[in-house]
Amino acid sequence: FTTASDASSPQATLTNLPPGLTSATTYSIGVGGIGVVSYQYSVDGGAWSIETDVAEPIEFDRNTEELHTLAVIGKNAAGFWQPADSPTQASWTIDLTAPTAVLSNYPTGTVSTTDASISVGGMDVAFYRYRFDDDTGSWSPVRNVGMPIDLSDLVEGPHTLEVIGADPTNNWQ
């Protein structure tokens, strides 16, 4: 391909990009830009694709948990390419691993209190759901990790609390 670094060089733009941290593994990324009629792209430093019309999006499909970088160069109708050493770039990280919720401040053994305020945390846990003495499978609404589970008026006897955590990309335990 031919490159030019003067004012006639186009600059590709990207639309429908994934957020910086995501659990999604497929995206349809649009390419455009003033005067851009076609493009080439490279994923994660790989080889440049064949020339593609801007009407066709980049179909991204990767299921590896890591940082991904997309580089795109545009071409205008006059045949000038955006310099390959100055591509339009976007990066994001795919996270598919669910975190593990960790409880603290919970009563253990036999206790004389009828109230409990239980904290939920854990590495990468941002949200959680819980169920308490519930054998029907009903979970609480989603709660932020900073909100404790406050239990009151507990009756005498054993109790069961189950908690599942989620990270910011919505991977659930």
Image (cartoon, grey):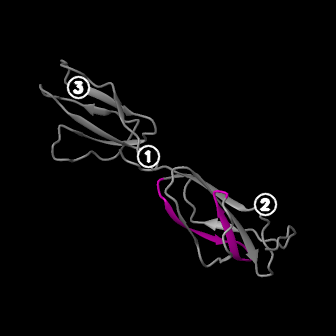
Q: Residue 133 lies in what quarter of the image?
A: top left
Question: Which one is closest to the eye, mark 3 or mark 1?
Answer: 1
Badge 2 vs badge 3, beta-carbon distance below 8 Å = no
Could you give the CA–CA distance between mark 2 and mark 3, rounded to whole angstroms?
63 Å
In the rendering, which numbered label is found on residue 97?
1
- Out of 81 and 168, give the one closest to the viewer: 81
Secondary structure of the residue carrying numbered label 1: loop
Q: Could you tell me residue 66's position as x and y percent? A: 55, 49
Secondary structure of the residue carrying numbered label 3: loop
- Mark 3 surroundings: few (<14), some (14-19) or many (≥20) residues within 10 A: few
> Is-magenta flag for residue 30?
yes
Could you give the CA–CA distance between mark 3 and mark 1, rounded to whole angstroms?
34 Å
Q: Is residue 2 left or right of residue 106?
A: right
Secondary structure of the residue carrying numbered label 2: loop
Label 2 sits on residue: 85
Q: Is residue 69 left or right of residue 172?
A: right
Q: Could you tell me residue 65's position as x and y percent? A: 51, 50
